[in-house]
Image (tube, helix red, strand yellow):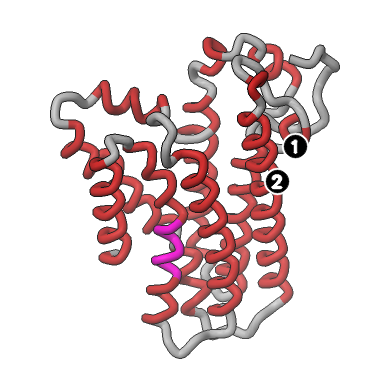
Amino acid sequence: MPAIGVLALTAWAVCTMRRNVGLVDIFWSLFFLVAAVVYAVVSAPAGPRTALVLVLVTAWSLRLAVYLAARNWNAPEDHRYQTIRARNQPNFAWKSLYLVFGLQGLLAWLVSAPLAAAIASEAPLRALDWAGALLAIFGIVFESVADGQLARFRRDPGSDGRVLDRGLWRWSRHPNYFGECCVWWGFYLLAVAGGGAWTVFAPLLMTLLLLRVSGVALLEKDIGERRPDYRAYVDSTSAFVPWPPRKARCAS
């Protein structure tokens, strides 16, 4: 989609000027907001799901973009992107245009398929639409609470080297990613209600990214080296789906 490509190019220019590719995370959710707006314009006149989808995508996208901007704008480049940078020298600034920004734009276009299907549908609203909307709202709230708890933990001067194992993080090692997953399965239910069951590849792809690619697996690859107590946290706490801790342990 050209609109996503333009935003990806803008993100590349901003991140290159600041020498921080990790700032692409700020733009990730905005790809979907731009896509949803374009789908709505192209599908005019508005269908029965257009306003509902746009409100949900806007709430999710802007909340996440603002949170990540506040957290990352003046922070050092995330260690995940430092690894990518080191692995692709020399001329990483140019290589990142397709390795990072082009790839993320492509993934966003693929994952946005349920939004396109739901917005373009002329089928009347059904109970499944409201179930999808409720699941998406639950995911937005769950992710927001988890992010808020993590932000407060990071502001604590005594948190260096420690593990956040309170609040939602007591029940899941990645409650923010679980909330994100719920958002996308909620969008998929809206697509199904509008006849877009074929877009199931999108939430499956997002779940795979969160669990095996850029999410849980990548974050936990070396976190045990930086936070020694994390190994005990792994033993007691579900990786993704919130679940009661498997055993009591001393606070870290």
Q: Nearer the viewer, residue 32 or 123?
A: 32
Q: Amino acid at mark 1?
A: Leu
Say which residue appears at 65% left-offset and 12% top-offset. 231
Q: Locate residue 245: give its quadrant.
A: top right
Assess disc 1: are there few (<14), some (14-19) or many (≥20) residues with their C-alpha within 10 Å of its C-alpha: many
Whether residues under marks 1 and 2 lie with C-beta atoms below 8 angstroms apart, the answer is: yes
Task: Residue 124: give x, y in percent of width and height.
Answer: 63, 85
Whether residue 118 sits left or right of residue 143 in the image: it is: left
Is 21 rendered above or below residue 44? above
Q: Earlier in the sequence, mark 1 or mark 2?
A: 2
Given residues 204 and 12, the one toward you in this image is 12
Up the image or down, 138 lies above or below 83; here it is below
Q: Write the residue at 70% across / 46% down.
A: 145
Disc sitting over residue 168 in the figure: 1
Q: Residue at x 34, y 25 (%)?
A: 82
Can you give x and y, in whole percent of width and height, for residue 37 in the image? 43, 73
Residue type at numbered disc 2: Val
Which secondary structure type mostly characterizes the magenta part of the structure?
helix
Q: CA distance from mark 1 to mark 2?
A: 8 Å
Find the magenta span and give its range.
Answer: 30-36
Secondary structure found at label 2: helix
Residue bearing the label numbered 2: 145
